[in-house]
Image: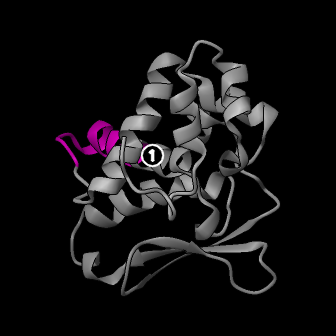
Amino acid sequence: MAEQRFGPRDKSYTILGFEFRAGLPQIWFPGDGMNVIVQLDSSSMNDPNLPLFQMAHECIHLLTPVLSANVSVLEEGLATYFSKDYMAVHFGGVWLTGDQKYDRAEVLARKLLLFNADAIKALRELVPVISRATAQDILKICPSLSPQLAEQLIVTFQSWDGKI
């Protein structure tokens, strides 16, 4: 579903599977860096749906894997948007992250997608790795988009203050 909506994943990375561990869900690069494992929060293990919600989020990071320190607001917002949408489509209801920063990143990514539903596919034709897109790249595919929004989307998520 993620590939259909946002373009094919980078197949130079081998997805080895998933595991549970204590802490926030993430992707992890064991070995030479071309292998990827999805790590889900072990506290969600007994919930029938929460691991799926977490996995849906991580699926976006599997499209174009980068180290967590380099993930942009756009990519985290897109991952949050996709996980909520995936769960609503397949299980119904409203899904919440419980984290205001992720929710705000989703608001910004959603603005881009409302402006152009195929923005991510078009952007990935210019820049294959989502988190490496520049504000200028975003404005090339959406010339009428607010330059301020484009600038907010390209900030690294870790360094972003979470303000919209």
> Can residue 1 be seen at all in this image of the molecule?
no
**Which residue: 27% across, 59% down?**
99
Residue most extreme to the top: 144
Answer with left or right where residue 48 lies relative to residue 5.
Answer: left
| Residue identified by numbered label 1 | 77
How far across and how far down the image is residue 23, in percent? 37, 82
Does 106 sit above or below residue 98? Answer: above
How far across and how far down the image is residue 3, in percent? 62, 41
> Can residue 92 be seen at all in this image of the molecule?
yes
**Which residue: 43% across, 43% down?**
82
Answer with left or right where residue 50 lies relative to residue 156.
Answer: left
How far across and how far down the image is residue 59, in percent? 53, 55
From which residue to which does the magenta span run? 82-95
User: Which amino acid type is shown beneath numbered disc 1?
Assistant: Gly
Q: Secondary structure at mark 1?
A: helix
Could you say which quadrant of the image residue 53 lies in?
bottom left
**Which residue: 59% across, 23% down?**
118
How far across and how far down the image is residue 38, in percent? 53, 72
Does 60 sit above or below residue 32? Answer: above
Of the 4 image quadrants, the one containing the C terminus is top left
**Which residue: 50% across, 71% down?**
26
